[in-house]
């Protein structure tokens, strides 16, 4: 096997440099641990941007499902149905708001599908979509149009008709809605924006405003579901039901699975020829997704995420780190806002074998696997707290 240095050099030579990669090559993962090519072990408290934030790395149940399916059928195209796809769609809709599912591979693709579905469902002439400052919906052109301008530089012009307002400002939302508005898209917790949690009142008012204006409500749950926030889907914290929900990241336990879920009223809007994804919902990926949902049910991971997350947040609030301004989140989706930049904290933690992330310069992000062992979680948090206390 190549050394870490060799792998990093080959990466620099052969891969487009669109990621700000760290000089580390990971070769193995198990549960809440990762190992690099030089054999060093890390406690993973970020879960690959949440992609393994439910099951952890290489969960045996997910791996077994993939192996079984790989020997049976890996792809047959979407002109045919397949059993894992149906099983996964059923698991999602029965735990959400009914309706039907379109499968793809990434959150950005799911949001692209949601944009098209919303425009068709809203009716002719309605094309505008309201989104929120500090949101993040993806880097494809449609999703990018809904995302803050700092990500759009160099790619203009964007999709016409997007309007951005501040999260929590219902008056601004109402002012932005008109007879050209197709939908409002909101993250139940803003991930890239700094783990910002809207109030229940705002989310209820947002639902009412959409209803009044004849606009659809889209909940981007790419970061927040399934199970991560202590509910199957984070919209369930607020007592509202969206018209469209998008999923991604953790749905496949690290395998590329994403979905656009349409409520019953809009479930048949995307008729043949209106949208597609060649490998979306392929049997191999769908089998992984179905295994994830089964695991969540069997091990009661929704309740576990709620309990573990509250314990983590309480521990961080009482750690005595003077640089910590606020700890916020729900379940195992946690933000720690500092009074100074957090880049050095991320670096120092990694040097000591703990992986975390920073966004918006000052907000540390934690998204450990729900199934992470308590002893491993304690080890990671102890290291993080020590770094913060001595910052």
Image (cartoon, grey):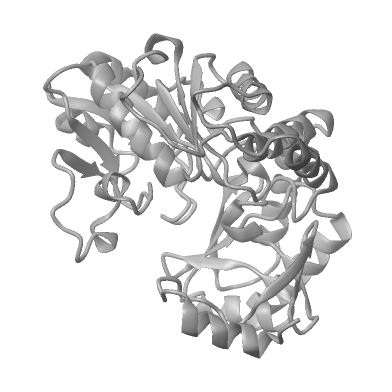
Quarter of the image holding residue 82?
top right
Q: How many dots with numbers?
A: 0
* Along the viewing direction, whichever of 331 and 321 lies nearer the viewer: 331
Please give the name of the residue rendered at 70% of the width and 45% of the height, measured from the top-left corner: 54
Residue projecting furthest to the right? 375
* Along the viewing direction, whichever of 214 and 341 lies nearer the viewer: 214
Q: Quadrant of the N terminus?
A: bottom right
Q: Is residue 91 above or below residue 334?
A: above
Q: Is residue 159 visible?
A: yes
Asked if residue 204 lies left or right of residue 324, the reply is left
Quarter of the image holding residue 354?
bottom right
Please give the name of the residue rendered at 86% of the width and 55% of the height, measured from the top-left corner: 374
Q: Is residue 391 visible?
A: no
Asked if residue 104 lies left or right of residue 345, the reply is left
Q: Quadrant of the C terminus?
A: bottom right
Residue 181 image point, x, y percent: 18, 27
Residue projecting furthest to the top? 265
Quarter of the image holding residue 76?
top right
Asked if residue 103 lies left or right of residue 64, the reply is left
Q: Is residue 10 above or below residue 365?
A: below
* Along the viewing direction, whichever of 285 and 375 lies nearer the viewer: 285
Residue 365 image point, x, y percent: 56, 60
Please give the name of the residue rendered at 45% of the width and 16% of the height, measured from the top-left corner: 263
Residue 115 image point, x, y percent: 30, 33
Residue 22 image point, x, y percent: 56, 79
């Amino acid at each position: 096997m190549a050394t870490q240095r060799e792998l990093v050099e080959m990466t620099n030579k052969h891969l487009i440099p669109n990621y700000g990669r760290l000089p580390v090559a990971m070769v193995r993962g198990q549960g809440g641990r990762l190992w690099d090519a030089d054999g060093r072990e890390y406690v993973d408290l970020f879960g690959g941007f949440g992609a393994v934030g439910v099951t952890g790395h290489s969960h045996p149940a997910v791996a077994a499902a993939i192996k079984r399916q790989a020997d049976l059928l890996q792809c047959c195209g979407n002109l045919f149905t397949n059993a894992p796809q149906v099983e996964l769609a059923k698991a999602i809709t029965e735990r959400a708001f009914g309706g039907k599912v379109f499968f793809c591979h990434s959150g950005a693709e799911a949001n692209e599908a949601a944009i098209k579905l919303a425009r068709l469902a809203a009716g002719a002439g309605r094309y505008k979509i309201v989104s929120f400052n500090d949101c993040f919906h993806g880097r494809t052109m449609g999703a990018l149009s809904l995302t803050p301008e700092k990500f759009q530089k160099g790619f203009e012009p964007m999709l016409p008709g997007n309007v951005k307002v501040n999260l929590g400002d219902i008056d601004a939302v109402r002012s932005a809605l008109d007879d050209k508005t197709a939908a409002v898209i909101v993250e139940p917790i803003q991930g890239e924006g700094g783990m910002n949690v809207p109030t229940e009142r705002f989310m209820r008012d947002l639902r009412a405003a959409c209803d009044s204006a004849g606009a659809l409500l889209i909940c981007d749950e790419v970061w927040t579901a399934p199970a991560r926030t202590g509910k199957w889907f984070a919209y369930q914290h607020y007592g509202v039901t969206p018209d469209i929900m998008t999923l991604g990241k953790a749905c496949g336990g690290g395998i590329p699975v994403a979905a656009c879920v349409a409520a019953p009223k809009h479930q048949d809007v995307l008729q043949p020829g209106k949208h597609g994804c060649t490998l979306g919902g392929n049997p191999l990926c769908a089998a992984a997704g179905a295994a994830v949902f089964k695991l969540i049910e069997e091990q009661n991971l929704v309740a576990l995420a709620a309990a573990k997350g509250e314990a983590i947040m309480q521990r961080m609030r009482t750690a005595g780190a003077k640089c910590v301004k606020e700890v916020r989140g729900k379940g195992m989706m946690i933000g720690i806002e500092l009074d100074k930049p957090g880049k050095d904290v991320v670096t120092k933690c990694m040097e000591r074998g703990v992986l975390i992330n920073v966004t918006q310069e000052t907000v540390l992000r934690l998204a450990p696997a729900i199934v992470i062992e308590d002893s491993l979680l304690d080890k990671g948090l102890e290291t993080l707290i020590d770094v913060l206390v001595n910052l």
